[in-house]
């Protein structure tokens, strides 16, 4: 009995363990390997959390919507989709779809129009020039983020969060954007530190929905893992 050397085979090996498809001897072996190799233990924990998240109500809705978009592609997929929908989407197929969804779909922030509406009330003659410059840095950072200029976006948002006179809404918005810029620029540990600040926030003004929080958490972990 040997641990698979190929990453794909190892992933399937871990799935068999989580789905109770192993013999008693195989389970003893992989659990011994997890004690020896912390990286394997981390991989198992990450995949297990993925399966746990799939049982949340939002995932069923997202998966069904995704499946509807896939129906037009091939007859084989249509047949598979119907079977999966009848069985509430088999665990393995759901896991693959979920991983693809949270790994590759972008994190969405509240509409930019909402951001602008907040600044309009602050950008009159009574607003300090420095404060207006801060707002300009924020919107410039959003532009750099959208254009893939992540290092410049980091610089913009770092300047914003270091200002103490802006409203909580914009401070939180800048922190979230900075976290994404850190992640995209290859600094997942810094992104995670910001994310952790908002995990238990119940009175935050800049609202990020739970789906996007999950996506952000997974993409941080994926970046740290790979």
Image: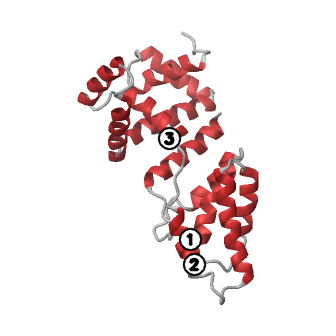
Give the secondary structure at mark 1. helix
Pick the residue in front: 5 or 144: 144
Give the secondary structure at mark 3. helix
**Residue plotted at (46% across, 20% down):** 27
Pick the residue in front: 149 or 3: 149
- Is the C-beta separation of discs 3 and 1 under 8 Å? no
What is the crowding at mark 1: few (fewer than 14 residues within 10 Å), some, or many (at least 20)?
some
Residue labelled with disc 2 = 120
Q: Residue 1 at what x, y percent from top left?
A: 54, 9
Q: Residue 26 at what x, y percent from top left?
A: 47, 16
Instruction: Determine the CA span between mark 2 and mark 1.
Output: 6 Å
Q: Earlier in the sequence, mark 3 or mark 2?
A: 3
**Residue plotted at (57% across, 11% down):** 2
- Is the C-beta separation of discs 3 and 2 under 8 Å? no
- Is the C-beta separation of discs 2 and 1 under 8 Å? yes
Look at the picture and state if 165 lies above or below 148.
below
Q: Earlier in the sequence, mark 3 or mark 1?
A: 3
Q: Residue 212 at what x, y percent from top left?
A: 49, 51
Look at the picture and state if 139 lies above or below 35.
below
Residue 64: quadrant of the picture: top left
- Number of the front mark, 3 or 2: 2
Look at the picture and state if 118 lies above or below 113.
below
Residue labelled with disc 1 = 116
Query: 100 left or right of 181?
Result: left
Residue 215 appears in the figure = yes
Instruction: Determine the CA span between mark 3 and mark 1.
Output: 28 Å
View extreme (left): residue: 86
Q: Residue 84 at what x, y percent from top left?
A: 30, 26
Residue 112: quadrant of the picture: bottom right
Pick the residue in front: 72 or 55: 72
Residue labelled with disc 3 = 102
- Number of the front mark, 3 or 1: 1
């Amino acid at each position: 009995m040997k641990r698979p050397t190929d990453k794909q085979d190892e992933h399937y090996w871990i799935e068999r363990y989580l789905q109770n498809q192993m013999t008693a001897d195989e389970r003893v072996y992989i659990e011994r390997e997890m004690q020896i190799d912390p990286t394997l233990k981390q991989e198992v924990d990450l995949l297990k959390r993925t399966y746990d998240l799939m049982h949340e109500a939002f995932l069923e809705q997202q998966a069904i919507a995704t499946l509807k978009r896939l129906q037009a592609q091939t007859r084989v997929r249509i047949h598979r989709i119907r079977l999966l929908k009848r069985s509430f989407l088999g665990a393995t197929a759901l896991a693959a779809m979920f991983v693809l969804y949270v790994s590759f779909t972008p994190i969405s922030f509240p509409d930019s129009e909402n951001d602008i509406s907040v600044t309009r009330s602050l950008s009159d003659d009574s607003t300090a020039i420095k404060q207006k410059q801060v707002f300009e840095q924020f919107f410039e950072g959003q532009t750099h983020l959208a254009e893939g200029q992540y290092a410049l976006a980091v610089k913009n948002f770092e300047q914003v969060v270091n200002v103490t006179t802006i409203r909580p809404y914009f401070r939180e918005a800048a922190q979230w954007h900075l976290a994404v810029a850190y992640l995209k620029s290859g600094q997942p540990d810094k992104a995670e530190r910001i994310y952790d600040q908002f995990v238990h926030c119940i009175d935050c003004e800049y609202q990020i929905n739970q789906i996007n929080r999950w996506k952000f958490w997974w993409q941080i972990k994926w970046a740290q893992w790979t």
